[in-house]
Amino acid sequence: MSGVVVKNMSFKLGQTLTITGIPNSEATHFVINVGNSEDDLALHMNPRFDAHGDTRAVVCNSYHGGKWCEEHRAGGFPFNQGEEFKVRNYTVCVCVCTKVDVCVCFQFNPC
């Protein structure tokens, strides 16, 4: 599994996980995975600039027991190639913000 992988992390109600990154200027998509292992992902976030039949779409999912759960497509697309972003994962929602403080927040309930 490629991309950013955060694993073996205790995440409790009220805590926030912030991931800062800059997508490659030639990137078609990238992936952020948060979970206990590659086989147990609470959050799989796949921002797609132009990949897998999608253009400027954020696709989220979770992965448990060898199976993908129901896909969620977030509204809005705050990512730009070559520009910094911050993903803030709260226990109740996920927010993506750019360095100019344009934020898109959405509910995501892993299976």
Image (spheres, rainbow, N blue to C red):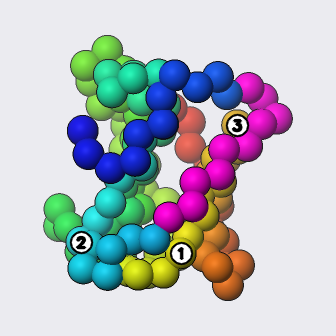
Q: Is residue 39 left or right of residue 88?
A: left
Indicate the amino acid at tag 3.
Thr
In the rendered image, residue 74, in percent from the top left (x then y), is placed at 49, 60
Indicate the amino acid at tag 2.
Thr
Seen at 65% across and 51% down, the residue is: 18
Q: Which residue is mark 2?
A: 28
Q: CA distance from mark 1 to mark 2?
A: 16 Å
Q: Quadrant of residue 50?
A: bottom left
Mark 1 or 2: the one toward you: 1
Instruction: Classify the position of the N terminus by image quarter.
Output: top left
Q: Which residue is mark 3?
A: 91
Total numbered labels placed on residues in the image: 3
- Whether residue 96 appears in this view of the structure is no
- Local packing at callout 1 (Cα closer than 10 Å; few below 14, some 14-19, many 20+) is some
Q: CA distance from mark 1 to mark 3?
A: 23 Å
- Whether residue 71 appears in this view of the structure is yes
Seen at 82% across and 35% down, the residue is: 14
Indicate the amino acid at tag 1.
Glu
In the rendered image, residue 85, in percent from the top left (x then y), is placed at 55, 70
The first of marks 2 and 3 along the sequence is 2
Mark 1 or 3: the one toward you: 1
The first of marks 1 and 3 along the sequence is 1
In the foreground, 59 or 45: 45
Residue numbers of the magenta segment: 12-21
Residue 17 falls within the magenta-colored stretch: yes
In the rendered image, residue 10, in percent from the top left (x then y), is placed at 64, 22
Seen at 78% across and 29% down, the residue is: 13
Q: Please, what secondary structure does the residue beneath circle 2 have? A: loop
Q: Which residue is mark 1?
A: 84
Specify the principal SS of the magenta part.
strand
In the rendered image, residue 20, in percent from the top left (x then y), is placed at 57, 61
